[in-house]
Amino acid sequence: MRLNMQALRFIAVGCLAAAVHWLTVVALVEQAALRPLLANLFGWLVALGVSFAGHHHLTFRGHGTPLRHSMPRFVALSATGFLINETTFAASLHWSTLGYRILLTGVLVLVAGMTWALSRLWVFRGNPARA
């Protein structure tokens, strides 16, 4: 039951962070005339804070991992996810005729699964007996 609740909290926080990311990208493309790949970088940076705070305080609460360990791990994981995101997004923009909004949505969903597994097993591992 605990894993199910943790998964639901992960999904909720992830959806919020993805929405912040997506809305930031769309706003920067449509209001500031940034190119989608550059706007995606800013979207990730804004969503990074939302994601870490939510997962640290809600999804993996009580994890017991000190902030000085979990934050650098999370940033490393998120940066890796962003590199996969940006590479996939760039390839999709080049090869697909779908709009950037649809492509970005797909890329964000793709990276979410990797983030869940590595957050649970590495970033917020804390006491392995409680995981």
Image: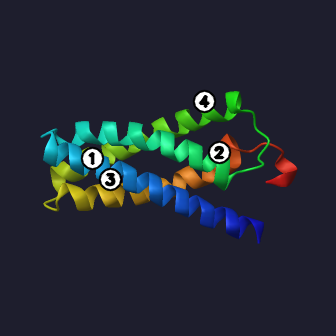
- Residue at left 84%, top 53%? 130
Residue 38 locus on image (x, y percent): 24, 36
- Mark 4 to mark 1 CA distance (whole Å): 25 Å
Q: Which mark is residue 74?
A: none
| Mark 3 neighbour class, 10 Å CA radius: few under 14, some 14 to 19, many 20 or more | many
Q: Is residue 50 visible?
A: yes
Which residue position is annotated with label 1?
A: 25
Position of 2 with respect to 111 (left or right) is right
Which residue position is annotated with label 2?
A: 56
Which residue position is annotated with label 4?
A: 72
Rendered image quadrant of residue 47 = top left
Rendered image quadrant of residue 98 = bottom left
- Residue at left 37%, top 46%? 85
Q: Quadrant of the C terminus?
A: bottom right
Mark 3: amino acid: Trp
Number of the front mark, 4 or 2? 2
Sequence-earlier tag: 2 or 1: 1
| Mark 4 neighbour class, 10 Å CA radius: few under 14, some 14 to 19, many 20 or more | few
Q: Please say if 73 is above or below 26.
A: above
Which residue position is annotated with label 3?
A: 22
Q: Please say if 55 is above or below 69.
A: below
Mark 2: amino acid: His
Mark 1: amino acid: Val
Mark 4: amino acid: Pro
